[in-house]
Amino acid sequence: MKIKSIISKFRFDDSIINRFVKGAFWAVFGNVVVKGLSLLSSIFIARFLGNFSFGELSVIKTTLSVFSLMATFGLGLTVTKYIADKKKNNLPEIGKVILAANKITLFTGSFLGILIIIFSPLISKYILESENLIIPLRISGVFLFFNAMNVYQIGVLGGLEAFKKMARVNVIVGLFSFPVMIITTYFGGLNGALVGLTLGLIFNWFLNRKLINKEVLKLGIDQRDSKVSIDYIKKMLKFSYPLALSEGVYSVTNWLLIYLLLYKTNYGEVGIFNSANQWAQMILFLPGAISNVLLSFLSNQENDVKNYNKILKLNLIFNIGITLVFSILISVFSSFVFRLYGESFEGGEKVLTILVFSCIPMSVIGVLEHVYISKSKTGMIFIFKLIRQSILLLIAWIMFSFYKEASSLSISWLVGYIITALIMILYLFKKRILKLN
């Protein structure tokens, strides 16, 4: 009887639950293939490059994330929210949303990509303190552009609830990228690894573009008839700029954390941390895969308190459960995992064990952030992210005073994310924004 009463709490409108579960299933399925192949290829890449060059690749990718935040300007989540809203009562405006997002991203992505290419010698010499990274950074300018385009495309497809077809695209891209990454890295080293990453993004952009055009036509919308004014673009940017600021805080402080690790140690320790972090990201791919599904459905059910809270509760339980199980499994086999990377990555199992458990509070925070976006309270996300990243920097600075190794940064992540998750939960309940009864 007790089990039945627990199950009954999760029963709500069949059409809603079926759409949500199907969307979540296909989002997870597609990402399983992509993330699995990506993780496997990263092991080969790490062995080919060694911990030093792999650390250089990690620093470049982290540096790119700072520029990417300006290129995407929070449009991924904004577009998902807008399109999910328009699907209910204003289909023709979906074309406007897509066109506006495309124009913004084309401008910001091109501008910042060219900026990186032009200033790569200065970034390499004075910021990354290595003149060997000029060519990798120039390749990264192209990577940045197509990454920005992919972010907004994923937002569009999430809003359109094309999760099954997105899964198919992800599988095709994963199967394409896996051999390309290994071949380009084997023959081209660090430059080859970045070329492989860029080729994968270009292929992904092409397939996403075809899929978006097909899905929009199915809704009877001709994008050629869509016109967008400067005022409409400003309206979207007004909604997205708090998200862009929060992503900015996240990317800049993460870059500072990695740079602090590099400053206090060396590229080898950065390589060890990043290889461990890839496994942590692998755990987070399941919660992350359904984040667009969650936002789309929360936006659709914003005015239906019962369905809204049950979707939210279901997602929280799923996130905590799945991250806990995988964190335990990976920590048990952490020594075996790092033997796969080679001798230069010795000692990484300690970093990995700590990092994987930070995924639990991280997955909770991800769900709570979507609550704010669905209720158009994007400014609060910026405030909480600023608090969280400040805590991480403070703890990391203290930890590096005692231990100059990658494990110091992983401890900072674990403690910082736990504190932030607790603060967010307490605030949400106090303001009666979150009700799980």
Image (cartoon, rainbow, N blue to C red):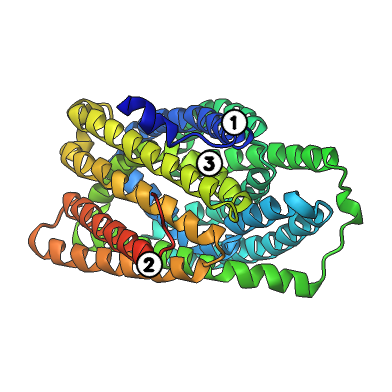
Q: What kind of residue is marked 2?
A: Phe
Question: Residue at point 50% right, 54% down?
Answer: 135
Placement of the N terminus among the 4 image quadrants? top left
Identify the residue under disc 2. 384
**SS at mark 1 in the image:** helix
- N-terminal-most mark, 1 or 2: 1
Residue 134 visible: no
**As drawn, 30 above or below 77:** above
Q: What label sits on residue 202 in the rendered view?
A: none
Q: Where does residue 344 sit, x and y in percent of width and height?
A: 22, 37
Residue 344 visible: yes
State yes or no: discs 1 and 2 in contact (Cβ < 8 Å): no
State yes or no: discs 3 and 1 in contact (Cβ < 8 Å): no
**As drawn, 222 above or below 398:** above
In front: mark 2 or mark 3?
2
- N-terminal-most mark, 3 or 1: 1
Q: What label sits on residue 18 in the rendered view?
A: 1
Q: Residues within 10 Å of mark 1 (few under 14, many from 20)?
A: few
The one of 300 and 37 positioned closer to us in this rendering: 300
The one of 276 and 412 positioned closer to us in this rendering: 412
- N-terminal-most mark, 2 or 3: 3
In front: mark 3 or mark 1?
1
* 229 sits to left or right of 393: right
Label 3 vs label 1: CA separation? 35 Å
* 91 sits to left or right of 149: right
Question: Residue at point 57% right, 55% down?
Answer: 144
Q: Quadrant of residue 421?
A: bottom left
Q: What kind of residue is marked 3?
A: Leu
Identify the residue under disc 3. 197
**SS at mark 2 in the image:** helix
State yes or no: discs 2 and 3 in contact (Cβ < 8 Å): no
